[in-house]
Image (tube, rainbow, N blue to C red):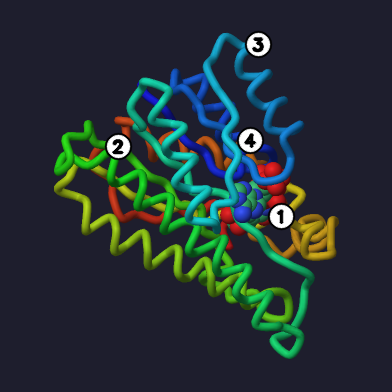
Amino acid sequence: MGIALVTGASRGIGRATALQLAQEGYTVAVNYHHNIKAATQVVNEIVERGGKAFTVRADISDEAQVLAMFEALDREGEPLSALVNNAGILFQQSTIEGLSAERINRVLSTNVTGYFLCCREAVKRMSHKHGGKGGAIVNVSSAASRLGSPGEYVDYAASKGAVDSLTIGLALEVAAQGIRVNCVRPGLIYTDIHASGGEPGRVDRLSSVLPMKRGGQPEEVAQAIVWLLSDKASYVTGSFMELSGGR
Ligand code: NAP
């Protein structure tokens, strides 16, 4: 089935996706930034269950590190067949008055430039144009791209708006090259990202306003990503799947 690269797979939605992709038979490249211990645990869990996986460190906002990561994948001897652009960041909840250029640029360089760079390198390897076998890409956006995250992190929401546009444009650009590009937009999911915004209990605080009256689990997002990457979704490209409990 080839290699599936999952960025930010050391925890949260990326971790759940890596575990499920390994069960489907992919060799999973578990990308992480800081937490080698957590990434290694994900690999160990996959291997214990009979799957194949390896860790690959790279800050996706750094072009040289992204290039080195894809070169490491090339040395594995299997084609890259799937990319999950998942690694994302946000910072302390704030109105726009508290946003510095430095913060905005950090959010955009990871959540937007990082996704672009990984898409670029994946397309080079997957495209029929370059002799590749084709492949599938899923971008992890957010319901924030529709809702705007007022008073919390409009910078983050705007970065996810860019991910949506990237998905539309790239899906059309590479549709005839054997590559499908789709997007998931999770809502409130139980992961540690909310602690980065300064409110670890955010999902529970807001769950009562959701139509389904509960937050989502990372595994529920992972299932959708795995389906979009699979041949079961062979006629699906440029699509958005809302994983937000009805909001
Ligand atoms: P999370 O628990 O905070 O995990 C983030 C992951 O991204 C970690 O594995 C982290 O690696 C990695 N990462 C961060 N910066 C990176 C960089 N520059 N290069 C490479 N890896 C980097 O996040 P999550 O909640 O699972 O979110 C995953 C994706 O879903 C994000 O794109 C997020 O925006 C989106 N999302 C989440 C929710 C939600 O409610 N949780 C809702 C909508 C969308 P290290 O720990 O090794 O540094």
Reading the image, the residue beneath label 3 is: 48
Reading the image, the residue beneath label 4 is: 15
Q: In the image, is the residue at mark 4 within 8 Å of ligand 1 by its beta carbon?
A: yes
Rendered view: 220 above or below 204: above
Give percent across and percent down for residue 24: 46, 21
Alpha carbon distance from label 3 to label 2: 27 Å
Q: Nearer the viewer, residue 29 or 184?
A: 29
Per the image, label 1 sits on a secondary structure element best described as loop
Give percent across and percent down for residue 114: 50, 57
Task: Name the disc covering residue 135, or none.
Answer: 2
Q: Residue at x 46, y 56 (%)?
A: 115
Query: In which image quadrant can residue 73 be found?
Result: top left
Q: Amino acid at mark 1?
A: Lys
Q: In the image, is the residue at mark 1 within 8 Å of ligand 1 by its beta carbon?
A: no
Q: Of marks 3 and 2, which one's residue comes earlier in the chain?
A: 3
Dot 4 crowding, Cα within 10 Å, few <14, some 14–19, many 20+: many
> Is residue 6 found left or right of 130 in the rendered image?
right
Q: Of marks 4 and 1, which one's residue comes earlier in the chain?
A: 4
Give percent across and percent down for residue 218: 64, 41
Q: Of marks 3 and 1, which one's residue comes earlier in the chain?
A: 3
Alpha carbon distance from label 2 to label 1: 36 Å
Reading the image, the residue beneath label 1 is: 213
Per the image, label 3 sits on a secondary structure element best described as helix
